[in-house]
Amino acid sequence: MKYRTLGRTGLKVSEIGLGSEAFVNQTVDFGVELVETALGAGINYFDLYNPEPYVRDVFGRAMKGRREKFVMQAHLCSAWLGGQYKRTRNMAEVRAAFADLLTRLDTEYIDVGMIHYVDEQQDFDEVFGGPVLQFAKEQKAAGKIRHLGMSTHNPRIAIQAARTGEIDVIMFSVNPAYDILPPNEDVNLLFEKSTYEAPDVLSSTDPVRQELYSLCESQGVALTVMKPYGGGALLKAEESPFGAAMTAAQCLHYCLTRPGVATVLAGARSKEELLEAAAYCDLPEEQKDYSALLSSCPAHPFTDKCMYCGHCAPCTVGIDIATVNKFADLCEAQGMVPETLREHYAALDTKAGACIQCGACETRCPFGVKIIEHMQKAQELFGE
Ligand code: SF4
Ligand code: SF4
């Protein structure tokens, strides 16, 4: 397993995390065993959106005596009422659900207290201008939540949350299919194949989503990824909007090569699926590489924009082309060269200015990126 820093929280988290869909319609014993398998594979990041009592009990049992092995991302505003899940903004329900969470997990604190599922502008305005955010901040001040987060499928809402300065972690739906769609308040559109036939669907990452990734990376707001397989559709050619099947490893790699992403929550429903996702970190590069597939798929081939896939390597003189392109894009998104990026660039072994324009990389880039031009621009931007 490999580990990354969860943005400005400074927490070290596994690149692959575990989402709580894994526990739906299971038993506490099954759940505890699955968590044990996850820990054995080096996973330390767990999402708990599911308020069902027995799912919370799974973590109460699994964490006993070893709380420090878990980085828990658990959700506020997700309640179990009348035997059913409910997203709620009713403060009596929000308070009761949070008290139940701490009791069942038998813990003093949650690492990331995630305000649950904010996709609509009106809801965002009410949550951030009203008692929900206030409550979350009170719990943080009391030490019961270490860092605040928010989950959403809407990149416009995610951008606003990142800009508040209150939110350190955003749980966001990332995969190549959602990335070509303009923002929308209706999550259901993401799952409908007809959505991908609309005229405004792009042949590369939607600019608002790109802005979100760049903003998060530059502000130290960590993205934790949900729906990396597009609800499973990307794994089947007949269901995928691209008309070709991706492997689980390719989907995970796509997410982990987006700027700002710290961990991907695998939606494993069995030990085998979990271990397959966790094995991603040990796979050779060619098994993770999604570039050929996305650039040549029958529908919506990605073109003309660097996807940071690394397929163009090795550069003749040793430039890390994907990283140089990423840094240059981050500067472009901010309209300036921030000092931190200048330092990161300075730490690269070989700078863009070393490019001898041999063109070897361009023949290997499946997305048709004009790499020589990009290196020249990066040299002008960073001065070396
Ligand atoms: S230049 Fe092309 S091959 Fe290289 S990282 Fe970007 S998209 Fe991938
Ligand atoms: S064209 Fe420049 S960036 Fe590409 S392989 Fe040659 S030296 Fe490296």
Image: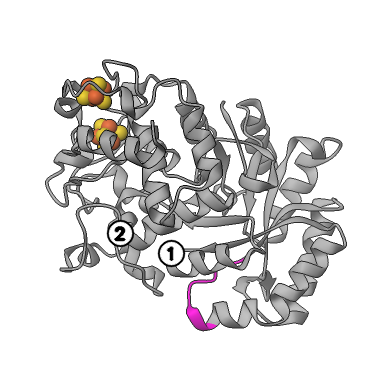
Mark sitting on residue 55: none
Residue 263 appears anywhere in the view: no
Q: Is residue 295 above or below residue 224?
A: above
Residue 380 in the image: state x and y as whole percent: 33, 39
Q: Is residue 280 above or below residue 234?
A: above
Mark sitting on residue 206: 2
- Residue, x 69% and y 41% (percent of image)? 10
- Residue, x 79% and y 41% (percent of image)? 63
- Residue, x 62% and y 71% (percent of image)? 84
Mark 1, residue position: 155
Decide whether the magenta segment is chiefly helix, strand or loop.
loop
Q: Start and end of the magenta stretch? A: 116-122
Residue 298 in the image: state x and y as whole percent: 11, 46
Is residue 197 in the magenta section? no
Front one among 342 and 64:
342
Q: Are the residues flagged by discs 1 and 2 in contact, CB closer than 8 Å?
A: yes
- Could you classify mark 2 by the number of other residues whose Cα lies within 10 Å: few (under 14), some (14-19), or many (20 or more)? some
The quarter of the picture where the N terminus appears is top right
Residue 362 in the image: state x and y as whole percent: 17, 29
The amino acid pointed to by label 1 is Pro
Q: Is residue 205 left or right of residue 24?
A: left
Mark 2 and ligand 1: say if the CB distance to the nearest ligand atom is below 8 Å: no
Q: CA distance from mark 1 to mark 2?
A: 10 Å
Q: Secondary structure at mark 2?
A: loop
Q: Residue 258 lies in what quarter of the image?
A: top left
- Could you classify mark 1 by the number of other residues whose Cα lies within 10 Å: few (under 14), some (14-19), or many (20 or more)? many
The quarter of the picture where the C terminus appears is top left
Is residue 118 in the magenta section? yes
